[in-house]
Amino acid sequence: QVQLVESGGGLVQAGGSLRLSCAASGSIFRIDLMAWYRQAPGKEREMVARSTSGDNTNYADSVKGRFTISRDNAKNTVYLQMNSLKPEDTATYYCNMNVIRRTYDRMDYWGKGILVTVSS
């Protein structure tokens, strides 16, 4: 089994910054895709940022230039640096990883989510 644990959320004023972390542990051979999603109340879950094993990154248009995704493959950890936060960034943020397990099968895993609240 593989577990993802997120940290770093909380309450911040508009214009402020937060850094989210998500660490994976368990039966891991390699992690290809690491991503962050978010879901605001009453809205569908949306992709925020994603990072492939080839160091390609993609961002939602709404966060380009403000958020940066990075990864530490040795630690099986992905980060999301969020700057210039806006009230509309308020959501529960979820970590997602596509993991190749030590049994060489591929599985998709999600964290439990972490709340980010941006006050105006």
Image (tube, rainbow, N blue to C red):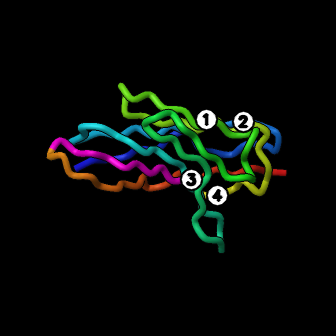
Label 4 – label 1 distance at C-alpha = 14 Å
Q: Amino acid at mark 1?
A: Arg
Q: Residue at the location (29% across, 55% down)?
A: 107
**How far is mark 3 from mark 2, CA to CA?**
15 Å
Q: Position of residue 92 (x, y in %)?
A: 58, 57
- Seen from the viewer's position, the closer of residues 120 and 3 is 3
Q: Amino acid at mark 3?
A: Tyr
Circle 2 residues within 10 Å: few <14, some 14–19, many ≥20: some
The answer to whether marks 1 and 2 mark residues whose Cβ atoms lie closer than 8 Å is: yes
Estimate how packed mark 1 is, as few (under 14), some (14 to 19) or many (20 or more) residues with alpha carbons within 10 Å: some
Quarter of the view holding residue 83: top right
**Mark 2 highlights which residue?**
17
Which of these two is toward me, 103 or 56?
A: 56
Whichever of labels 4 and 2 marks the residue nearer the N terminus, that label is 2
Disc assigned to residue 93 = 3
Three-letter code for the amino acid on which mark 4 is drawn: Ala
Please state the extent of the stretch shown in magenta in the rendering. Answer: 94-102
Residue linked to disc 1:
19
The quadrant where residue 112 appears? bottom left
Which residue is denoted by mark 4 in the rendering? 91
